[in-house]
Image: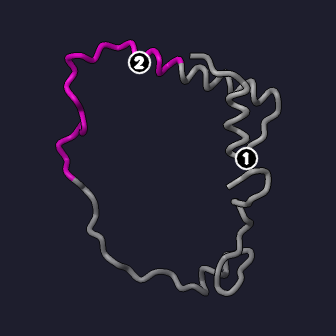
Amino acid sequence: MAIREEQVDHVAKLAKLSFSEDELHQFTEQLGEIIDMFETLEEVDTTDVALTSNITDEINVIREDKAVKGTSRDALMKNAPESENGFIKVPAIIDDKEGGA
């Protein structure tokens, strides 16, 4: 399956990314190679291969969930470059400009 630069450019715009012509060409080639790899995997006959949902006999090896005392807000805020009303102030990443969310 070939992927076109127009498709890559469309997805980039949806993600609010912009690429130079060289970058767009490079990403299109790379995505094409990835798609080709998946198409190669589709050719593998897995008819008699048993379904694998877990490759080990281990069952939920996770730590016990225990509440622990965290770091004080004042100590954390000392590392924040900018704060307001006790919260860390960050630039907006979602807005209504340029047809965004």
Query: Residue 67: where, in percent of width, then height?
Result: 35, 78
Viewport quadrant of the N terminus:
top right
Q: Nearer the viewer, mark 2 or mark 1?
A: 1
**Residue 25 is drawn in which quadrant?**
top right
Rendered position, 48 above or below 76: above
31 to the left or right of 84: left
Q: Is residue 68 left or right of residue 35?
A: left
Residue drawn at x 61%, y 17% is: 2
29 left or right, relative to 50: right
Q: Residue at x 82, y 33 (%)?
A: 20
> Which residue does the numbered mark 1 point to in the structure image?
16
State the image quarter where residue 24 is shown. top right
Q: CA distance from mark 2 to mark 1?
A: 32 Å
* Mark number, residue 41: 2
Q: Amino acid at mark 1?
A: Lys
In this view, the residue in front, 13 or 72, is 13
Which range of residues does the magenta coloring cover? 36-59
Expressed as whole percent of the image width and height from the top left, the position of residue 61 reads 24, 55
